[in-house]
Image: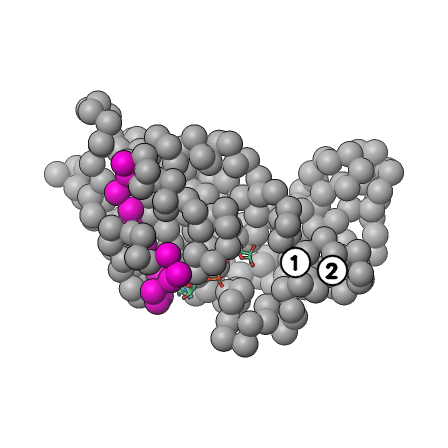
Amino acid sequence: MPPSNNHGARDPAAIVILTGAGVSAESGIDTFRAADGLWEQHRIEDVATPEGFRRDPALVHRFYDARRVAVQRAEPNAAHRALARLDAEWRGDLLIVTQNVDDLHERGGAKRLLHMHGELLSALCAACGERHRWTGPLGDGPACPACSRAALRPDVVWFGEMPYPMERIYRALQRCDLFVSIGTSGAVYPAAGFVAEARASGARTLELNLEESEGSALFDETRLGRAGELVPAWVEEVLGAEEG
Ligand code: APR
């Protein structure tokens, strides 16, 4: 689906891309909603909610400390690299919004990128709200380097918390000509609502996923397969159409 500009101008189309765990699956990072309903052998309520953290902070820290180590060993795959190529070569507006907390998009080379669910390689101070780049463990309770008033927590958005810059994301959705969802189950809001928002603004919508998702019916087109194959082919199509 080569993007066309719906808004009358001769500028290249504005594209918003939403990515989820499926984009990183081929880099060896587990998706969330595996068939057993567990995330790396843990219940989501225990490791991805503020209540779970209050109940057992040591467990939650052990969990994210292990994820942080795993992410730093993983490498970007063909899907990350293709999106970085699109980011570098697409002359129009483009925004990649990822639900992933890994840094594989940026290590693949993407620049126009937002992490709506936070980042594993970042730590958040619950007292002053400062965010600090963090590559080591948090389980031993380091104090906030900015205010020293509280121990740091993982800078990931848990269920019940507000994702990062929603205003900017909604502005981009309202202006986009093409919305593409890649490797996400469409089970978690607000991201699951982005397709409806983009449609309401007149955008075309495309889904690239391994299997039909909860939101598949809302897309103009769904292509099924592995992100490592579908994404490079789609990027080639988009950039080829622009040249042609
Ligand atoms: N290529 C493309 N899609 C894939 C691949 C692959 N190689 N492997 C898996 N998928 C698809 C799955 O079929 C599934 O539809 O990726 C999707 C991953 O879905 P989830 O595991 O639910 O992950 P995601 O949608 O990113 O979860 C959203 O939920 O737990 C929270 O905050 C967490 O950001 C996360 C959010």
> What SS does tag 2 mark?
helix
Magenta region: 202-215
Report if residue 207 lies within the magenta region.
Answer: yes
The residue that appears at 24% across and 50% down in the rendered structure is 220
Task: Where is residue 124? Give x, y as percent.
Answer: 72, 43
Residue 48 has which mark? 1
- The quadrant holding residue 70 is bottom right
Q: CA distance from mark 1 to mark 2?
A: 7 Å
Residue lying furthest left: 244
Report if residue 47 lies within the magenta region.
Answer: no
Q: What kind of residue is marked 1?
A: Ala
210 over 199 or under it: above or below? below
Tell me whether the residue at label 1 lies in contact with that at label 2, contact meaning CB atoms closer than 8 angstroms.
yes
- The quadrant holding residue 42 is bottom right
217 over 85 or under it: above or below? below
Mark 1 near ligand 1 (CB under 8 Å)?
A: yes
> Callout 1 environment at 10 Å: few (<14), some (14 to 19), or many (20+)?
many
Image quadrant where one finds the C terminus: top left
Residue behind mark 2 = 52
Mark 2 near ligand 1 (CB under 8 Å)?
A: no
